Image (cartoon, helix red, strand yellow):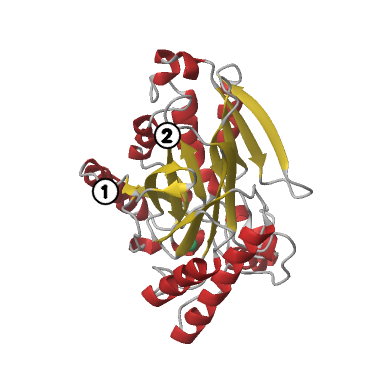
Amino acid sequence: MEITLSIIKADIGAIGGHMAPSAQLLATVRQHILEEAANILIDSYISYTGDDIALLMTHKRGTGDEAVHRLALDAFLAGTEVARAQGLYGAGQDLVKDAFSANVRGMGPAVAEMEFEERPNEPFLFFAADKTDPGAYNLPLYLAFADPMNTPGLFLSQKLAQGFRFVIMDVGHTECDRIIELVAPEDLYDIAALLRDPQRYVVESVWSRASSEQAAVVSTSRLRDVAGKSTGKDDPVMVLRTQMHFPSTGELLAPFQVGHFVAGGVRGSHNMPLMPCTLNSPVSYFDGPPVVTCAAFACHEGRLTEPVDAFAHPFWDAVREHVAAKAMEMRRQGFFGSAMLPLAQLEYTGVAERIERLQGRFRERED
Ligand SMILES: [Mg+2]
């Protein structure tokens, strides 16, 4: 049975600045989906991570379906009314364009979709991150799908040993969306050379070479380009299918113990470690640290089980402590050097304008 998983995610308003959506906002979005989903969806799961609300939807209509995208947009529009009425910060923030034509791509919300033949048992992981960019998933995906130090299945399992195909997008290319396809393990060094720069190159999807099935999909939309100006971080969502031809759940979760540094934090302008948090977590310290949540599901004929909170296990308490220590250590150096993003990647123009004003005061040294 061909099933489509569609995740459409947006920040349409939050309490306390950018911390979390209100209960009433979330309830309104849920209610809209419940009331309007008949004949469109098989099932849905609605959650939040930081200030973002993600709609995880199952159906049989394929990717980019107009009715599914319209449903999500209308739910976000209904929610935006509540956000305005409650005085939430950034009401309707991610709905940067009004004109809907066929789907929400290019309108602001992040989209990750995957169509596949459902296996007799279909386990998958749904990740949502806040206060960071899609490139935040580069390192976990590299480790999970290409590094036997993380994923012993790459040499223990004949299915995994055939490797994986990475589709990588060049998000820094302004003319068009460029992608490149590279295969692990043969192209390992090429993959590493691109993924080391998560602001420029972002993994969009990963595919099994043994079965040609899709293993991973990441939202790679660029809010900055959609809006024509900075509107915040792109706060990516991701789905990973697990087991059989794919890494095990444990192999897919393991890379998140690193707490690697990603772009994010206050004003989206810093380097901060990514903290794995429990489902429906707000953000706090320094408008972060950037958070990632993971809901594990099983799915049968498109019907979802209840989620298991993958980062709720006590193991992750130790990781969170470690990540908090890394965050505080980085913050001790304030604006200096690698604590802050390079000039070209800052979401605010103030510092560039300040430096521009100083140009006239520079003079040639005379000695
Ligand atoms: Mg957000």
Which of discs 2 and 1 lies nearer the camera? The answer is 2
What's the residue at 48%, 70% (across, down)?
29
Q: Quadrant of the N terminus?
A: top right
User: Vertically, is 211 above or below 201?
Assistant: above
What's the residue at 37%, 39% (across, down)?
256
Circle number at residue 121: 2
The alpha-carbon separation of the residues under discs 2 and 1 comes to: 23 Å
Nearest to the observer: residue 234 or residue 265: 234
Nearest to the observer: residue 333 or residue 318: 318
Where does residue 291 sit, x and y in percent of width and height? 39, 53
Q: Is residue 91 in sight in this rendering?
A: no
* Mark 2 or mark 1, earlier in chain: 2
What's the residue at 42%, 34% (across, down)?
121
User: What amino acid is at disc 1?
Assistant: Ala
Circle number at residue 312: 1
Does ligand 1 reach within 8 Å of label 1's beta carbon?
no
User: What amino acid is at disc 2?
Assistant: Asn
Q: Is residue 217 in sight in this rendering?
A: yes
User: Vertically, is 116 above or below 9?
Assistant: above
Where does residue 162 sit, x and y in percent of width and height? 54, 16
Where does residue 309 sit, x and y in percent of width and height? 31, 49
